[in-house]
Image: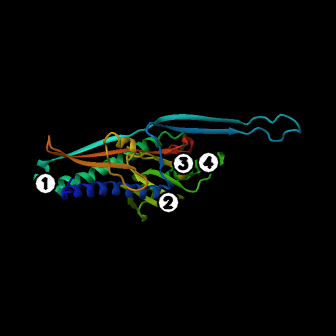
Amino acid sequence: MAVTKTTNIDVTVREVDFVSRFSKNWDALREIMGITRPIRKAPGTKLVAVNGTCTLENGNVAEGAVIPYSTANVEEVEYGDVTVEKFRKGVTIEAVNKYGAVAAIEKTDDAFLNELQLNVLGRFFTFLKTGTKTSAEATFQMALAMAKANVIDEFNKMRRTVTEVVGFVNVLDVYKYIGAANITVQTAFGLQYVKDFMGYSTLFLLSAPDIEEGTVIAVPVENIDLYYVDPGDSEFAQLGLNYTVQGETNLIGFHVEGNYETAVGDSFALMGMTLWAEYLNGIAIVTVDDSF
């Protein structure tokens, strides 16, 4: 009969704590961005963004005449796959002996979690720059206004509802604009943001290279989705790979085990997450050009 030891319990608690913190962070970010619910996808699912247009023909058709087709076009842009990513971190016995378990294990777990989050966000910020609704304005204020107006205009043309718009700007531009004025800056998921700023439900304050100075990106919340592959998938378990997951929406799997051969404590993370915008023409990118 197997005996449950204190070390087994400690490892389980550590795994649960890791995935719980990760999930809570993402829940907070989803709420800020207005994402309704993550969408579970099968491994290898293609990520396809679309540009849709429709030109109506005259609807005043004579009795008995053939009704002309309106011209509708959908251009698909394939971006990649929703893939499963594998990550590993090791902590040696020497590190624990030198710095203690708190510094060697807990602090590196925190750093590991943070880097995993930034991995997903970094790819999202890169993707946002592929938006096709581009223009230029003379001032930062007009760039903010027209970026929001442009995405609302595009969604109006598609007869799609826009409830809120989120924006992404360089933090230096915001403080240049507001000067000495006080704004309430909040932080979640390692991101700084301002609520209800210039008509945006949320304005994220980023730095280069995520977003350069003089650039405003706007996206309706209806155009942002979070796709994920479940690390707790039973088919993965058939390989003998069992990861700790948390809740109904399993965004990440985490497993800890000791490697006696190298005297290293290994931590394994499994995740397949992608933040995505379905419509490229529903992403407005406005640059500030003071030569106007």
- What is the CA distance from the residue labelled 1 to the residue labelled 3? 46 Å
Label whose residue precedes the other's in the sequence (1 or 2): 1
Q: Residues within 10 Å of mark 1 (few under 14, many from 20)?
A: few
- What is the CA distance from the residue labelled 4 to the residue labelled 3? 10 Å
Q: Nearer the viewer, residue 212 or 180?
A: 212
Label whose residue precedes the other's in the sequence (2 or 3): 2
The label number, if any, that marks residue 197 in the structure image = 2
**Secondary element at image label 1:** helix
State yes or no: discs 4 and 3 in contact (Cβ < 8 Å): yes
Front position among marks 2 and 4:
4
Q: Nearer the viewer, residue 276 or 232?
A: 232
Left or right: 259 in relation to 269: left
Q: Amino acid at mark 1?
A: Tyr
Q: Residue 54, relative to residue 31: is it above or below? A: above
- What is the CA distance from the residue labelled 1 to the residue labelled 2? 45 Å
Q: Position of residue 133 (x, y in %)?
A: 56, 42
- Which residue position is annotated with label 1? 99
Q: Residue 205, relative to residue 90: is it above or below? A: below
In the displayed orientation, state which residue is furthest to the front.
Answer: 1
**Secondary element at image label 4:** helix
- Which residue position is annotated with label 3? 223
- Which residue position is annotated with label 4? 155
